[in-house]
Image (tube, helix red, strand yellow):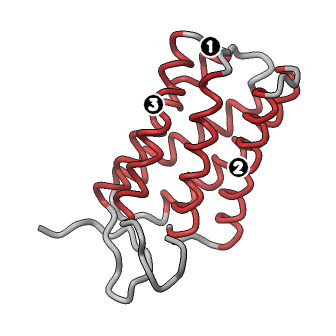
Amino acid sequence: MLTPTREVLSFRTLAVLPSVLFMPSLVTFAVAPGAVAAEYTGVLFHLAIMFIVARLPAPQWAKAAGFGWLTLDVLSAIMTINEVPHEIAWSVRLGGHVLAGMWFITTSLLARPRSIRVVGVVLGTWLALYSFLGNVLPQEFLFPGGILVPVWFLLLAWKHQPSQDGAPSLSPRTA
């Protein structure tokens, strides 16, 4: 986790962690849209994903998109916590979701398990397309994509298997 040669937390743990951290934000979004409290766990959720972006096999440009998404989403959460007008913070978040879409789609297409590919491509497409339509669609239209986020990370936790040389891999598990 912190060095290339020493794994402090398993990939499975790292993949489950964002799902757990995203649940309070997802519930808050469903029952109290716009509540600032969700932003606190949202920051932790995005920080936890940094380890996943670093470890999943992907081209450097896709990893840069993943880190860019995380940076912009953390920024927009902190802006919201500090009472920056919603229109500004929301626009920053949607810009980050375009990068998130690129990262989810790319890493998913490189995965062998079909479930990760399908869920990841749908999720990435949903996030990116909503970003371009967010000015005319209500925020509730983003919710289906939000449900796919923990599903995708749990699929990673279940399907990920490190390669023999220690490099990350998404090959299917063999029983």
Q: Residue furthest left?
A: 175
Which residue is painted at 61% across and 51% down in the image?
Answer: 47
In percent of width and height, residue 122 lies at 50, 41
Up/down of 174 relative to 158, above or below: below
Residue 173: name its quadrant.
bottom left
Q: Nearer the viewer, residue 150 or 130?
A: 150
Q: Is there CB contact under 8 Å for labels 3 and 1?
A: no
Q: Is residue 118 left or right of residue 106?
A: left
Q: CA distance from mark 2 to mark 1?
A: 21 Å
Residue 126: name its quadrant.
top right
Q: Nearer the viewer, residue 125 or 144?
A: 144
Q: Is residue 75 left or right of residue 173?
A: right
Can you identify the residue that label 2 sits on? 69
Earlier sequence position, callout 3 versus callout 1: 3
User: How would you rate the neighbour count of disc 1 (Cα within 10 Å): few for under 14, some for 14-19, many for 20 or more?
Assistant: some
Q: Is residue 132 left or right of residue 51?
A: right
Quadrant position of the C terminus in the picture: bottom left
> What SS does tag 3 mark?
helix
Three-letter amino acid code at disc 2?
A: Trp
Three-letter amino acid code at disc 3?
A: Met
Earlier sequence position, callout 2 versus callout 3: 3
Q: CA distance from mark 3 to mark 1?
A: 14 Å
Up/down of 138 relative to 122, above or below: above
> What SS does tag 1 mark?
loop
Q: Is there CB contact under 8 Å for labels 2 and 3?
A: no
User: How would you rate the neighbour count of disc 2 (Cα within 10 Å): few for under 14, some for 14-19, many for 20 or more?
Assistant: many
> What SS does tag 2 mark?
helix
